[in-house]
Structures are given as C-alpha cells and as structure tokens.
C-alpha cells in the first residue's frame, strides 16, 4: 500500500491530516515508509489539549495508561534522553535544556531528567505521541513498557509482556500474512533507518482514550445517514518505529489524528474515496474495526456527499 508523505499542517490540502485509504486497492501490508529523523515527533495546534488530557489520565487512571517491566529501565532512560535532545534541537522555541533540567517553554513546566518520574513516563508527558518500547526476547520482540494515554481499542494490561504475535492475535489475517514479515523486520531494523506507517479507523466516540471497542457485534440504530457525520469520527494513527542504538530496543510511537466525519462535506472527492475504500474492506476487517455498527448509514451519507446532493442539518451543502 502506498501512503502519502507527511506534510506540515499548514500545507495539507485534505480536510483530514492523512488519508491512508488512498493507497489503492485493499491489501494487508506493513506499508512502511522511510522516516526523516527530524519528522519523528509531530506538534500541532492541539498540543496543549492533548498534553492536558495526558496529565488528567496519568493522575486519574495511571495503571491503565502507564506500565513498565523492570527490564525496560535502561531503554526508558535512553529514550528519555534521546527525546529531550530531539525536542530541543527541532523545536527550540518550545524546549530548552540546561544541564539535566528540561523546560517545556510552551507549557511553562520544568522536568528534572533524573528526578522521581519513571523515564518513560516523563518522556510521554512531553509529546502528543504515545510511546511504547519493544525488546527482543526468546519469543521475539515483546512490549516491555508503554506510556499509552490514547489507545485505539486496546488495553495496555492485556498486551504488556507479550510478543508481537500475541499482541496482534485479534487482527484479521495477521497470523497468516504479517506475523513473519513483521518479526523479520524487527530483527533486521537499523538504528539509522527509522520508519513510519498509518493505520485508520472510524469510531462513534470522540475520546482520545479508547481502550475498548474492537469487533462490536451491535448495530446502533440511533446513527442515521442524517447524523452520522456528526456522530462518527475519522481516526488515524501515525505510527513511527525507531531503533535505540545503545539498548537495541525499538520505540513505537503512536500519534493520534482525529476529525469529525462531517469534515468530508468540505471535500466531496474525499467522501467518494473513503466510500470506495470501505467497500473494498473484507467483512472480517469491517467487523474488527466495528464499522458494521453504522456501516449502512455511513455509506449512504458518504455517497450523498460525494454526489453533491447532501444538505447538512444547518442547511449548508
């Protein structure tokens, strides 16, 4: 699958930040692209609200959004220090480091890099991305630590300590088509060759923190073609993979971009392409993504927007 290259927010022509469904006919693939080192971390106009939500979740639901096994200690310290160096170099207007104190100028917060916070916990409080660490073991690469405030329908406690095959067990066709290529890629990945990919979904929940919701069997009769644009959200995970050169751990970054589906009303061609992509998805994938909950009204809405005969409840096209 071919993915669009990332663009600065001010230069993006689409109503959505990324449109991974534009990659042609559906096929299950890793879809990896080379990542420029300076593009590792994204910061946009939602930075303050994302970090405020992280702070709330870490205060109120800490065991659900942060966990680290003892073997992740060295990799966590390495990631913390590499992230601090990256942020001060790429975003000097937002971050400054003096000795072992990192100042987030944008939020007027100071962090003692050698303080009481777990190194990965501290790192996660600096950026909009969630940060996970994968480390090699007898069963392959295992999830050993994560600052995971914005999961898309998975729970950290269910995945911690498990290898990639078990983590992705519920994903349709993963075992048959992707497990071995993913394992080989992790084994061979070089520290100087980071990569990125995109994953997308549609949800009827605007929350950033979504630990459940895969493979819902229900149909929501309250979602109709008239209100699906307001009730459903297009959600993209911009995923980055970077090998840490000292520990050898792999940092898996997940940056959430989310839009109300109604944003397609500004761009009928986008609605047409999304409808086409949805019609290509196998039933197993539609079910796994829980799109079946609102599938029929969703397609009706997208088709009407694409045809130019949609009128919003406010009377605007």
Image (cartoon, rainbow, N blue to C red):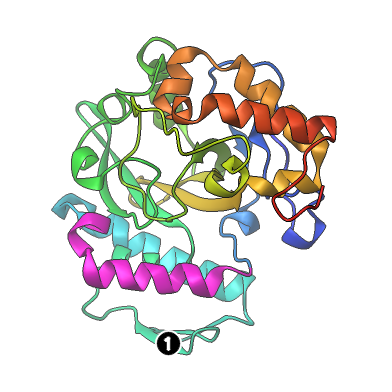
Task: Name the residue tied to disc 1.
Answer: 109
Q: Residue at x 54, y 37 (%)?
A: 200
Is 87 in front, or is 188? 87
Image: magenta residue range: 45-67
Is 88 in front, or is 175? 175
Q: Is residue 119 visible?
A: no
Residue 166 in the image, given as x and y percentages of width and height = 25, 26
Question: Which residue is situated farthest in the top direction here?
Answer: 176
| In the depicted structure, whether residue 122 falls above or below residue 110 | above
Question: What kind of secondary structure does the magenta stretch mostly adopt?
Answer: helix
Q: Is residue 93 visible?
A: yes
Is 256 in front, or is 79? 256
| In the depicted structure, whether residue 67 falls above or below residue 33 | below
Q: Residue at x 58, y 15 (%)?
A: 27
Q: Is residue 49 left or right of residue 71?
A: right
Residue 164 in the image, given as x and y percentages of width and height = 31, 29
Residue 174 in the image, given as x and y percentages of width and height = 40, 18
Q: Is residue 32 left or right of residue 12?
A: left
Q: Is residue 127 magenta?
A: no
| In the depicted structure, whether residue 220 falls above or below residue 53 | above
Q: Is residue 58 magenta?
A: yes
Q: Residue at x 24, y 74 (%)?
A: 117
Q: Quadrant of the N terminus?
A: top right
């Amino acid at each position: 699958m071919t993915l669009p290259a990332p663009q600065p927010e001010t230069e993006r022509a689409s109503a959505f930040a990324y449109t991974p469904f534009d990659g042609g006919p559906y096929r299950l693939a890793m879809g990896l692209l080379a990542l420029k080192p300076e593009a590792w971390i994204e910061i946009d106009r939602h930075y303050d609200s994302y970090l405020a939500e992280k702070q709330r979740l870490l205060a109120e639901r800490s065991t659900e959004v942060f966990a680290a096994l003892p073997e992740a200690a060295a990799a966590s310290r390495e990631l913390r220090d590499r992230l601090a160096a990256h942020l001060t170099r790429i975003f000097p207007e937002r971050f400054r480091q003096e000795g072992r104190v990192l100042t987030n100028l944008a939020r007027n917060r100071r962090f003692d890099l050698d303080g009481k916070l777990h190194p990965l916990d501290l790192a996660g409080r600096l950026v909009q991305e969630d940060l996970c660490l994968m480390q090699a073991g007898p069963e392959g690469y295992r999830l050993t630590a994560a600052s995971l405030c914005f999961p898309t329908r998975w729970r950290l406690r269910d995945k911690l300590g498990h290898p990639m095959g078990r983590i992705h067990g519920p994903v349709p066709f993963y075992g048959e088509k992707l497990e071995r290529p993913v394992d080989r890629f992790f084994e061979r990945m070089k520290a100087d060759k980071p990569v990125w990919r995109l994953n997308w979904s549609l949800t009827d929940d605007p929350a950033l923190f979504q630990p459940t919701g895969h493979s819902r069997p229900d149909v929501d009769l309250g979602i109709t073609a008239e209100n699906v644009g307001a009730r459903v959200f297009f959600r993209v995970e911009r995923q980055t993979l970077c090998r840490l050169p000292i520990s050898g751990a792999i940092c898996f970054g997940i940056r959430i971009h989310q839009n109300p589906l109604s944003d397609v009303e500004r761009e009928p061609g986008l609605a047409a392409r999304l409808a086409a992509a949805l019609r290509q998805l196998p039933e197993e994938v539609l079910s796994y993504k829980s799109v079946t909950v609102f599938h029929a009204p969703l397609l009706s809405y997208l088709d009407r927007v694409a045809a130019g005969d949609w009128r919003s409840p406010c009377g605007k096209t």
